[in-house]
Image: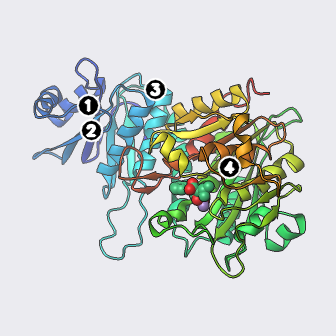
Amino acid sequence: MAWQPGLPVHGTREWVIVVGDGESGLPAAAKEAGERLGIDLDRLLEVQRETGFTPSAGATVAYPLLTGDVAEVLLVGAGDGSGKDLRHAGAAIARYGRGKDELTTIVAEGIDDAALQAFAEGVVLGSFAYTQKTVDPGKPAVGRITVTDGSDAARQPAIDRGVVVGRTGWVARQLAITPSNEKDPAWLAARSTELAAATGLEATVWDEKQLAAEGFGGILAVGSGSTRPPRFIRLDYVPAGATRKTPYVVLVGKGITYDTGGLSLKPREGMVSMKRDMTGGGSVIATMSALRELGAQVKVTGLICAAENMPSGTAYRPDDVIRHYGGRTTEVKNTDAEGRLVMADGLAYAVNELKPDVLIDIATLTGAIKVSLGSMLYGGMFATDDALADNLADAGRISGEELWRMPLPAEYEDLISTPIADSVNSSKGPGSITAALFLKAFTGDIPWAHLDLSSIAESPSDRFEYSTGATGAGARLLTTWLTSDAPTSGIG
Ligand code: BES
Ligand code: MN
Ligand code: ZN
């Protein structure tokens, strides 16, 4: 994607005009473009409005031209011109542009950097496709999009930033949508080391022998039913010029590469789509991969707890007692509550070995969060620190991956107690909250937030910046937060 100062002398065969709500709605530069194309764009928009077009975010109408070099003019609604609406507009343009080499896009003059960045994110995400179809696989993404507002301004940095943030969403989605005959814990580790090498991170991978030697009992138990052994993946980012005062953040991601439920087997309907139960881990990988390019000013370690949850003769069972990293014990009552078991090891490792200033975990942890928050509107957030919750909520609004804060009442801790061990992994009651409380016991006294993103991990349709299926939720959120001016301000 390229920013073009002034109107390009030679436009492409397709022109896209991003139309806002304001007065005429047309960007100033559209007038000049219209003259050049020999059409009255004001009149065109008026006619289109009369036939039902409204400039709501992402609405499109294509107008074929029968003469000249230009084949088609597309009007795209920019809604209220906010970042969120422009992200939707960008995605709509990418969908229209599928199979085309090039588009020239005119946006309103004065659109701010945040909105322009969001627009670029939308273009990248709307270009996403995944298929293994051998017949009619669909059209490739648009080759190139030129953006201009007709002014002399230099706006490439905002676009570049949007492309990188959009790409984190793309990478997370790609990892999550990959089927589990291809994707196992070793595959996830291989993708991590590859991306780390390409993006200036250090990568370390624990195999099952090292996990056993160091006492990662949760990850080992959950992975024990599968012939494809578990992995623990660590990615480290240290910004150039870091000192001992540089804030340190650890991200822990759930990397269940397939969740059958294990011996507490899921019913058929519940199992479908569980290839994306590593969405949290994938988002951590994708986030880490963008930190150097975006110049994040915090030290960050990403930990991915990867295992495949399968039933078999070697699988862990209900009633087993697990000893986590660092020694805390859990009585298993349901092998389908596996996410918290692997995450507990990751959190304990972070607390014992890394001692960060801020600890975040991200997971598709419970179905219950979908009952609480519905689908594709909010991810669930639990936090022990108000400033951390606020900073993350801000990043949610900016990135378009919004969070809703949930409570962590100590009164419910009884629900996860058992005479047999320090906690039990499944209980009656508010499922997302008890899962969060289970994890809280592993976070020491480090300011901590838990993101339960099951509610935004799967899109039912091609809608806004999402394509049907796995969304790769969380990568844009975390990237936006970690590259904000002061991600850890006020915390602690
Ligand atoms: N991976 C699931 C949670 C999930 C469900 C994510 C649906 C996305 C869509 C998790 O491992 C799980 O199975 N959770 C159980 C917990 C229960 C057994 C305590 C759940 O939510 O039903
Ligand atoms: Mn499960
Ligand atoms: Zn799961």
Q: Which residue is mark 1?
A: 55
Query: What residue do we see at 64% from left, 69% from top?
Result: 309
Is 155 in front, or is 358? Answer: 358
For the N terminus, the image quarter is top left
Q: Quadrant of residue 318?
A: bottom right
C-alpha distance separating marks 1 and 4 = 36 Å
Is 154 in front, or is 353? Answer: 353
Task: Identify the amino acid type marked 3.
Answer: Ala
Q: Which residue is mark 2?
A: 59
Asked whether the viewer can see residue 60, the reply is yes
Mark 2, Cα crowd under 10 Å, few <14 / some 14-19 / many 20+, is some
State the SS at label 2. Answer: loop
Mark 4 and mark 3 residues within 8 Å of each other at the beta carbon: no
Query: What residue do we see at 88% from left, 55% from top?
Result: 326
Mark 1 and mark 2 residues within 8 Å of each other at the beta carbon: yes
Task: Identify the amino acid type marked 1.
Answer: Pro
Query: What residue do we see at 82% from left, 34% from top?
Result: 246
Residue that lies at the very extreme toward the bottom in this rendered image: 313
Residue 465 sits above or below residue 84 on the image:
below
Q: Which residue is mark 3?
A: 153
Residue 94 sits above or below residue 158 on the image:
below
Residue 102 sits above or below residue 190 on the image:
above
State the SS at label 3. Answer: loop
Mark 4, Cα crowd under 10 Å, few <14 / some 14-19 / many 20+, is many
Ligand 3 closer than 8 Å to label 4 CB: no
